[in-house]
Image (cartoon, grey):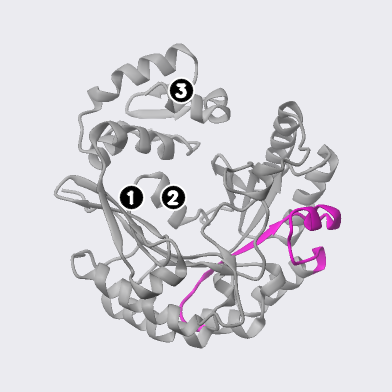
Amino acid sequence: METIPLSLYIHFPWCKKKCPYCDFNSLEIQSDTSVSEYVSVLESDLKSELVNEKRKKLVSIFLGGGTPSLIPGSELNVLFRIIANEFELLNTEITIEANPGSSEFSNFYDYKLFGINRLSIGAQTFNERTLKKLGRIHNSSDIKNAFDLARKAHFNNINIDIMYGLPNQTISEAIDDLEKTIALDPEHISWYELTLEPNTVFFKNPPKVPSDVRKERMFELGKEKLLAAGYHQYEISAYAKPGNQSKHNTNYWEFGDYLGIGAGAHGKLTKANIVNRTKKTRNPKDYLKNRHSIVKKVDPEELVIEFLMNALRLIDGFELSLFEKRCHQHRSNLKPFLLRALEKNLIEVKRDRVTPTKKGSLFLNELVLLA
C-alpha cells in the first residue's frame, strides 16, 4: 500500500500592514505582540500533532502568513530542531514567505543556516501607483533589493508572486510587471489573477479592475512570455524552470496529506482510508491560550469534489489510479463526471490520465460543479 506523501504547513499570522485584498488569516503586528511566545506555542502544537503521526519523511515544509519573514532566525532554532529530530529531511523543500518591505539579510542568512532552502517573495507588482492601491508597504526597488539579498544569502530556489487584473491596470502594465520579474531570473514565478474575496476591504468597496476579456488577454500574453523565457507551466498559475516545481503546492494539488500548525492553520490527514480535515483556533490570542483543533471527517462526495478542485489545477491533470489511492474509491465513481465534462469539452481522457482542456482550466469552478 502506498504511503501518502506528508507536508508541514506553519502559519505566522502577523504582518506589518494588512492588505485590502488579503483574505488570509493575518493581522497587523502590534508593539506588544510576542513572537517568541507564539513560536513556543507552535512547538507545543507540533509536538501534539506528532503523537499520532507515524510517517517520518516530509516532502515539504512551508512557513506562510502573514509575513513569517518577520520572525528572527534565532526564534526558529528550537522549532527546527524538533522538526529535524522527528523527520527525515533529505531532499525536503523548505519554503518561507517574505515581503520585500520586511526583508533583512540577517534573517535570510539565518534561515539558510536552519535548512530553509526556498524563498517566496510577495512582489505582486512593480508599478508604484498600483502598489499603493494594493496597500503594499514596499516599492519596486525593494523587490530587487530583497531578491539580491536572497541571492547573497545563497538561496538558489526563489519564487516571485506577481498578480494581474489589478485596479486600473492596462495590458501593457501587466506585461511590464512580468518582464521585470523574468529579468530577475527567479527559479519559479506565480502569475495569478487578483480575486476579490469575501471579508476583504476590496470586496466591500470593489476597485475598478480590467474586464474579463482584458484579463484573459493578460493571461495569454503573460503565458507566452513565460514559456519563451524557459519557464514551464505546470499549474494554472505556476511556472517553473526545469526541476523547480513547488513540491509543497504540488503535494496539495495531488491531494497529499499535510500537518497544519499555527493560528487558523488547516491540515489534511489520512488514517485507515479515512480522510480528516483539521483546523486550529483562528484568533492568535485565543490560539496562544488554547490551541484547539477541530477534526472533521470528509465524506465520500466531498472528497471527490475536493480532489477534482485540486488535481484539475495541474496542467497535466491526474491519473485515475491517483484518484483511487487518494480518495479510496473506485474510478467508476468518476464516470458520470467524466462523461459530462467530456461532452462540454472541459477535459480530455487518454488511457489512465484526465487532463483539463484550455477551456477547462479557464473555467475550473464550472468544471468541478459537474461532479
Looking at the picture, which amino acid does disc 2 mark?
Thr
What is the C-alpha distance between the residues marked 1 and 3? 22 Å
Please tell me which residue lies in front, 311 or 224.
Answer: 311
Are the residues flagged by discs 2 and 3 in contact, CB closer than 8 Å? no
Looking at the picture, which amino acid does disc 1 mark?
Gly
What is the C-alpha distance between the residues marked 2 and 3? 20 Å
What is the C-alpha distance between the residues marked 1 and 2? 8 Å
Q: Which residue is mark 3?
A: 347
Residue at 55% x, 53% y is: 242
Residue 193 shows in the view? no
- The quadrant where residue 68 appears: bottom right
Residue 324 shows in the view? yes
Considering only vertical position in the picture, is 352 above or below 194? above
Mark 2 vs 3, N-terminal side: 2
Element carrying mark 1: loop
Which image quarter is the C terminus in?
top left
Considering only vertical position in the picture, is 58 above or below 125? below
Please tell me which residue lies in front, 234 or 108.
Answer: 108
Number of the label disc, if any, that sits on residue 250? 2
Considering only vertical position in the picture, is 108 above or below 158? below
Number of the label disc, if any, that sits on residue 59? none
- Circle 1: is it few (<14), some (14-19), or many (20+) Cα within 10 Å? many
User: Which portion, as a residue range, is magenta?
Assistant: 113-141
- The x and y percentages for residue 253 are 42, 45
Mark 1 vs 2, N-terminal side: 2
- The x and y percentages for residue 96 are 53, 68
Q: Is residue 84 left or right of residue 130?
A: left
- The x and y percentages for residue 214 are 76, 30
Q: Which residue is mark 1?
A: 256
